[in-house]
Amino acid sequence: MGHPKDRRSSFAAAVVFLATLATQTLAADQPTSPAPSLSTADWRADIGFARTEMPRRHANLFHALTREQYDASFDRLEAGLDHLSEHEVVVRLAEIVASVGDGHSRLTLPMDPAAGFFSGHTGTSAPHVATFRHLPLRMLRTGEGYVVTETDAPLAVLLGSQVVETDGRRIGEADAGAASRGARR
């Protein structure tokens, strides 16, 4: 095992990578359940709540990023709000949470609760936005990339497989892109 900071960076990169993968999947497929769209005003209220509550509730939110970096992330999200789809807003929020750089901070992505596969380690209210398509995979980040460690029965043949590319990009490129969007190494 490496230094604890390396593990935090790896975890954050994995969160951003998987959120990006989920976005690509959602863009290709329809949401699994219909939900009313939130208005821009609703999103602004939710983003404002996250912006104020994360520093208030976290014991040391700025241990891996500065207040200026944090505020700039929220400023960019709010500035692009009129041009982003709901799933893009959710992924950008996930990137901000991942930039905190610890394993205690998370944003549960809006998954269909009927999927019956891992969607978080604590209970979370049902989403109020369209759910992401649930990929029935759990992966572990290794020095060489990602390895499938858990899946459902129809995909059991993938257990132990290494992920080599996503959306036509080699996994190292995708991982580096994800790291540049929220996770620091």
Image: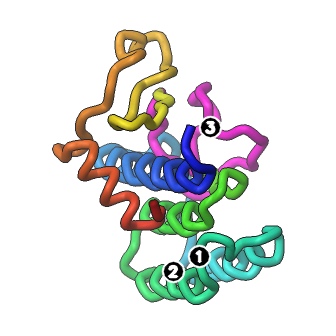
- How many numbered marks, from 0 up? 3
The answer to the question of whether label 1 and label 2 lie on touching residues, with beta carbons closer than 8 A, is no
Q: Is residue 126 above or below residue 147?
A: below
Residue 110 within the segment the image draws in magenta:
yes
Task: Provide residue 16's location: percent of width, then percent of height.
Answer: 46, 55
Mark on residue 119?
A: 3
Residue 94 within the segment the image draws in magenta:
no
Task: Provide residue 56's location: percent of width, then percent of height.
Answer: 82, 77
| Rendered residue at 34%/20% (across/down) | 161
Q: What is the three-letter code of the residue carrying label 1?
A: Leu
| Rendered residue at 36%/17% (across/down) | 158
Image quarter for residue 119? top right
User: SS of the residue at dot 2?
Assistant: helix
Earlier-in-chain disc, 2 versus 3: 2
Q: Which residue is mark 2?
A: 73
User: SS of the residue at dot 3?
Assistant: loop
Q: Which corner quadrant holds the C terminus? A: bottom left
Residue 47 visible from this viewpoint: yes
